Amino acid sequence: MKKIFLFVFSVLGTLLQAQDIHFSQVINNPLHINPANAGGYDGYERVVLNYRNQWSVVGAAYNTMGFSFDMPMFQGKRSDKAHLGLGLTFFKDKAGDANFGITQGALSVAGVVPFDRENRFVAAVQLGYGQRSADISKLQFGTQFNGQAFDPAMISGETNSLTSFGYMDLGAGVRYEYASKSDHIKGWDVNRVTIGAAMFHINQADLKYLSGSEEKINRKLVVHGMGRFDLPNTTYSIIPFFTYFTQGPLSEFNIGSLVRIELNPGTKVTGLLTESSLYAGLQWRKDDAIIPYVMYEFSSFSVGLSYDYNYSTLKKVSRGVGGFEISLKYHNLKGALFTRRTGSRIYD
């Protein structure tokens, strides 16, 4: 019981410091990582749905849901033309017995500037609105122990002094991408490197859980990178990636790699064959978890599954049970016959 209380109050302290929501599939959360990911790709519309269930063995589970939509604008049929990117995001999180909640929507506008067919730079701004809430009346306190067991009928003596509040939120990001492509009738051999950085909560909105509080939402810095390297004369690709977050006193470093196996290359001109691929790999979150990850991609659709195996000091309470996560993505790459944009099916 003592371990559970320590766990609950450590998480409670983190939440009150206004840390952001969390997804393990960072490469399947493009706008959550950087607003400069909006519309900066070859293709048309992209829709991503995410769901995460965490720490289900410790009281109420932590549930996080995400939605994002983005698309390039004014690009025409060529991917080497300067254009805009537009993105919309929505996230909702409920944490623990006290129902600490974060709900946020945001609009991202990006400027995509290709230097040539292999290099492009993206800069973006993001404007959002968030709502945070909590209800400590749902928590259990020591004053409700009757000498033998917890008695919910006993008065805790605690008042629900936490209030819900809304706030405006401002973010910005930049991204650079290099991609080389060897063209052939079935598809492309690709080498791609992307690196970017973003700052969220630039305006540091006031935290108003408690009346008279002078606390603010900490700014969050994100640095990320990813590559894709097709192995010549094979159906395999290596996709390494990393992300680094820092917000207030907390930081997080993730590194991992996926192996992509091309099951069917498809045909880029006639469209008679539909492309399909299988991804599998591991991700390591420093001092916290090992995360196996698989994804299946068919045509414009993909589904990804991951699971956090926790090995940190929280393992004594969580018993290694971390978080299950699923992502669904639709990425429209199709155009009319022989008028498809110059580009490639590159994991994004």
Image (cartoon, rainbow, N blue to C red):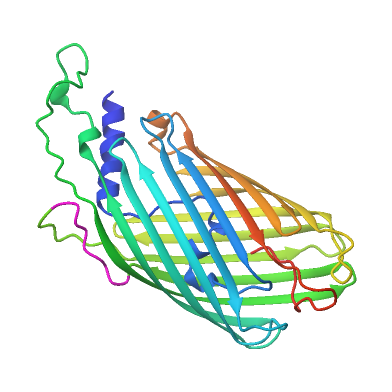
Q: Nearest the camera: 192 or 161? A: 161
Question: Can you give x and y, in whole percent of width and height, for residue 109 in the image?
Answer: 48, 77
Q: Residue furthest front?
A: 336
**Residue drawn at x 39%, y 29% as measured from the top left:** 316
Vertical arrangement, residue 288 with respect to residue 43, above or below: above
**Residue drawn at x 76%, y 72% as measured from the top left:** 335
**Residue drawn at x 29%, y 56% as measured from the top left:** 249
Question: Can you give x and y, in whole percent of width and height, for residue 157 in the image?
Answer: 9, 31
Question: Can you give x and y, in whole percent of width and height, for residue 314 in the image?
Answer: 38, 36
The quadrant in which the N terminus is found is top left
Vertical arrangement, residue 13 with respect to residue 337, above or below: above
Q: Nearest the camera: 329 or 112? A: 329
Whether residue 31 sits left or right of residue 188 in the image: it is left
**Residue drawn at x 14%, y 45% as measured from the top left:** 161
Q: How many numbered callouts?
A: 0
The quadrant in which the C terminus is found is bottom right
Q: Main secondary structure of the magenta part?
A: loop
Can you see residue 286? no
* Residue 126, image quadrant: bottom left
* Residue 149, image quadrant: top left
Can you see residue 54? yes
Q: Residue furthest top?
A: 148
Whether residue 289 sits left or right of residue 99 in the image: it is right
* Residue 325, image quadrant: top right
Query: Magenta span has 29?
Result: no
Whether residue 205 sits left or right of residue 110 in the image: it is left
The span shown in magenta is 202-210
Vertical arrangement, residue 75 with respect to residue 207, above or below: below
Question: Can you give x and y, in whole percent of width and height, for residue 170 in the image?
Answer: 35, 71
